[in-house]
Amino acid sequence: MTRTRRLSPQAEGVLRALAADPSEWRYGYELGREVGLKAGSLYPILMRLADRGLLESSWESVPVAGRPPRHLYRLTGTGLAAATEVAAPAVEESAAERDRPGTRRSLRGAW
């Protein structure tokens, strides 16, 4: 029996960032800046997501002269499904917050 731990909020953020354009290969540094994670947190998350089969990784095929090749990441089909699951509760939560009685609403454009 395989037991799967729940994803951390940081890992969920990485999945959401990759789901913005699931077919695009992304660099770790670029992802880290987007989701606000430093390398010491980001790369272990990327490795765990790849180990779970949610990401595929590859080395840059044509590195820039004077710089070592970079690792690239993108979602697998399973990863895209997981990213969709992660995004669904966030959408439901924001709708519930918006519809809750007593919630202040913006009056922009009301005048």
Image: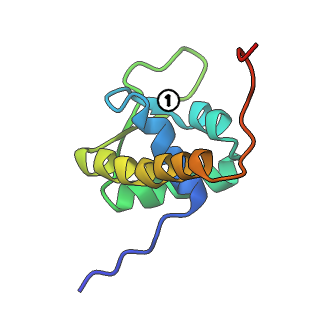
| Residue at x-position 43% and y-position 31% | 20
Residue at 30% from the left image edge and 56% from the top image edge: 53
Say if residue 34 shows up in the picture: yes
Q: Residue at x 35, y 53 (%)?
A: 82
* Closer to the camera in the image, 95 or 39: 95
Amino acid type of the residue that numbered disc 1 sits on in the rendered structure:
Pro
Which residue is depicted at the point 48% across and 46% down? 91
The residue furthest front is 111
Residue 72 shows in the view: no
Q: State the quadrant of the C terminus.
A: top right
Identify residue for label 1.
69
Q: Nearer the viewer, residue 32 or 15?
A: 15
**Picture coordinates of residue 52 (x, y %)?**
34, 62
Left or right, 32 with respect to 108, comes to left
Which of 102/78 is in front? 102
Q: Percent position (x, y) of residue 70?
A: 50, 32
Give the side of residue 2 with respect to residue 10, left or right.
left
Would you identify the image quadrant in which residue 110 lies? top right
- Comparing 81 with 52, the one in front is 81
Q: Is residue 87 above or below residue 47?
A: above
Q: Secondary structure at mark 1?
A: loop
